[in-house]
Image (tube, rainbow, N blue to C red):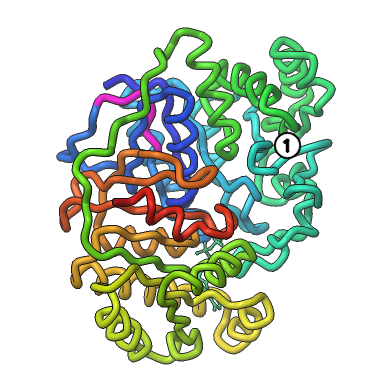
Amino acid sequence: MTLALGCIADDYTGASDLANTLTRCGLRTVQTIGVPPGDLNLPDVDAVVVALKSRSIEASQAVAKARAAEKWMRGRGASHVLFKICSTFDSTDAGNIGPVMDALRADSGNAVVLVTPAFPETGRTVYQGNLFVGSVPLNESPLKDHPLNPMHDSNLVRVLARQSKLRIGLVDLSVVAGGADAVRAHLAELSRQGFAAAVADAVFASDLEIIGTVALDHRVSVGASGIGLGLARALVASGRVKTNKATDISGNSVGGPAACLAGSCSQATLQQIAKAEQTMPVLHIDPEQVVAGRAETRRALDWAKTRLAESPILIASSSTPDQVAALQARHGRDAAGHAIEQAMADIAEGLVTSGVRRLVVAGGETSGAVVDRLGIPGFLVGPEIAAGVPVLRAVGARDGEMLLALKSGNFGGPDFFADALKLMQ
Ligand code: ADP
């Protein structure tokens, strides 16, 4: 297997979003959970997305994990490695985007690293280095209230400069509009001036194609699924990858009981939970009780067991920003988040023991905790439920055949849970 593209994703839902984008562009793609163990039987693919759970861990650990993944990919022929981050640039001043970017650049030569979280089809655009979420700047979007990475500055040149030891420049839209050679000339000039990375503006998909074309000249780039799209299209246009039909994961239907878990507190997920109440039993677990001990998890599993045979169920920890802030004030941000993630993982494990083989999870960190607990080493990418959210079929899972959907909090329409279950038979 010689990889045309290697990708390192800083969370699991981001990885499946990217794998979905690459698949749509015609790249045969597999998503692995961490660096694959030697005995994992990987199909022949163009791209591998190694999913890490490194967005909110200590920066030095995130760097070590990303370096190990990069080494594995380079060993399989990947000449370009994309570090996949969230399209809302989720991070803090401590990292982890800057430290990982610095380390990957140091491992891969000294070219200027192109950075853009833009993904216009999902409403993420970058202009003059400022990230917009739909029509509002990042710092006015719901991301200002994120439980782990509240984003208070929309200027990504500034945000990244606070995290990185490198000098961060800008490739503004007028340069991108000039085409690939204009971007190359601008990067050469930035390099002469001592810049080591540059945030690239992108407002349309065509901007991403130009950025992707130029990024392929280099060994490393940083961005969301949008730059993945640009890289994939550039690989296909250059003939380095022949377009393939999406990996067929339809296979046998999996059947059996189905369940949904929501640990995201995003506005989109809160709305989706409210909508799900109309079609399936929903249990809201009490976050305060979750932090206090394991009784709440047992209560949730008892509740689920009596209902699973009848219909899919949804268990949610999600609360409004006020309630999240109050819980965090009492217990600390990390302790509260971790306790709830682990409770969700406990619940997922219990549900699988009860026979659930179709599982929908809302929330990036939440999905990470769940997939780790279930010990799933990798996924093949199937049909798209909503923009950026594919159906995933587990590869090499200890519990056998399973279908999952891992959704970043903000993704999906109001009927997301029902939409997912329809495609997961
Ligand atoms: P998203 O994809 O929306 O970012 P994540 O799962 O990545 O969702 O992050 C949500 C975080 O909030 C997780 O750490 C989760 O455990 C935590 N969380 C979930 N419910 C609550 C709650 N009611 N109060 C405080 N934190 C919560």
Query: Seen in the image, is 93 located left or right of residue 69?
Result: right
Instruction: Look at the picture and state if 179 lies above or below 107.
Output: above
**What residue appears at the point 51 percent right and 46 percent down from the top-left corner?**
386
Q: Is residue 61 visible?
A: no
Residue that carries the numbered disc 1 in the rendered image: 167
Front residue (pair 156, 273): 273
Query: Seen in the image, is 145 located left or right of residue 335?
Result: right
Whole-percent x, y for residue 299 in the image: 33, 88
Q: Which residues are magenta?
A: 44-49
Whole-percent x, y for residue 132 in the image: 76, 46
Whole-percent x, y for residue 260 in the image: 39, 66
Q: Is the N terminus in the top left, top right, bottom left or bottom right quadrant? A: top left
Instruction: Look at the picture and state if 14 lies above or below 56.
Output: above
Query: Seen in the image, is 194 located left or right of residue 122?
Result: right
**What residue appears at the point 54 percent right and 24 percent down from the top-left corner?**
231
**What residue appears at the point 75 percent right and 58 percent down from the top-left corner?**
141
Front residue (pair 6, 366): 366
**What residue appears at the point 31 percent right and 74 percent down from the top-left corner?**
346
